[in-house]
């Protein structure tokens, strides 16, 4: 069994060292893994720093995004990944490496197609989530849950794990920004892939500013939701 961790980065030079130090813990639990950094047209020295780390650590691979945007960066990471499982992990240290190890153990044991983490179920824990963002998150995610008659409630969370071949089947990615994290789990559900839901931890970044802009992204989320609803309807009609 093996794992590729996709990390999209844009102007994250201040977070890289901490992220890599955290992920080095994987060596104790997963023999065959790599970390694929996809640089999304950073304007600082993020790419240069990552290239230096790739020379130091065999498990770090660095690529430049071919088309600007978070969605294309994720798609590029999927195409570059060669191992059995793929997890998307954020570069701001908001995600937990302990949860990543848990993801890997569960998807390996149960042979499911994905493990979807939720920050908003029993035993999950979130820290310093901005209040307005939290309100809008719960409003939108619960709306999506109702539309898809789903038992999941954290679609927009980036941090999940999938079988590599399943992610390949979801390509191409149509979302260009953070809405990619809505598109992927909705496709998983619509296409009847198997998944497990587990509680996870999340904490707000301490260094740098988030690239997430609510006003700018709202229309993108609506587009992705509409696209996935249409896909679901078409898939249901084929049955």
Image (cartoon, grey):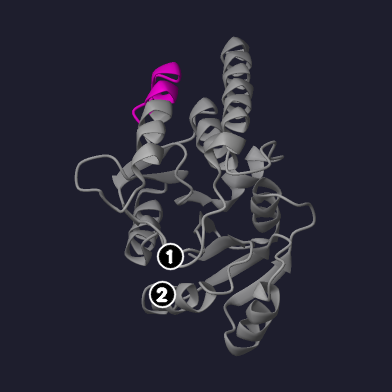
Residues under numbered marks 1 and 2 in contact, where contact means CB atoms less than 8 Å apart: yes
Does 36 sit left or right of 66 as displayed?
A: left
Q: Residues within 10 Å of mark 1 (few under 14, many from 20)?
A: many
In this view of the protein, which residue sits in the foreground, 2 or 222?
Answer: 222
Q: Is residue 184 above or below residue 17?
A: above
Q: Say which quadrant the C terminus sits in.
A: top right
Quarter of the rendering containing residue 140: top left
In this view of the protein, which residue sits in the foreground, 107 or 153?
Answer: 153
Q: Position of residue 90 (x, y in %)?
A: 50, 59
Q: Which residue, given by chain and number where applicable, does mark 2 sit on? A: 22
In this view of the protein, which residue sits in the foreground, 138 or 116?
Answer: 138
Numbered disc 1: secondary structure: loop
For this orientation, the residue located farthest to the top is 237
Quarter of the rendering containing residue 237: top right
The segment highlighted magenta reads 142-152
Magenta-drawn stretch contains 148 = yes
Does 18 sit left or right of 201 as displayed?
A: right
């Amino acid at each position: 069994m093996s794992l590729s961790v996709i990390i999209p980065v844009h102007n994250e030079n201040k977070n890289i060292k901490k992220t890599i130090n955290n992920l080095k813990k994987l060596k104790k639990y997963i023999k065959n893994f790599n970390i694929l950094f996809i640089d999304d047209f950073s304007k600082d020295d993020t790419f240069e720093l990552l290239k230096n780390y790739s020379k130091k650590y065999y498990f770090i691979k660095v690529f430049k995004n071919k088309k600007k945007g978070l969605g294309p960066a994720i798609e590029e990471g999927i195409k570059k990944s060669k191992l059995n499982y793929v997890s998307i992990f954020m570069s701001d240290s908001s995600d937990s490496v302990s949860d990543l190890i848990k993801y890997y153990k569960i998807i390996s044991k149960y042979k499911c197609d994905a493990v979807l983490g939720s920050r908003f179920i029993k035993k999950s824990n979130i820290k310093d989530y901005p209040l307005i963002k939290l309100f809008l998150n719960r409003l939108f995610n619960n709306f999506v849950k109702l539309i898809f008659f789903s038992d999941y409630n954290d679609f927009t969370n980036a941090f999940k794990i999938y079988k590599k071949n399943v992610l390949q089947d979801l390509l191409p990615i149509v979302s260009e920004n953070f809405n990619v994290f809505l598109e992927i789990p909705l496709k998983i559900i619509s296409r009847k892939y198997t998944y497990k839901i587990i509680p996870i931890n999340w904490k707000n970044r301490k260094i740098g500013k988030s690239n997430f802009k609510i006003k700018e992204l709202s229309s993108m989320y609506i587009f992705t939701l509409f696209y996935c609803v249409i896909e679901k309807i078409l898939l249901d009609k084929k049955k």
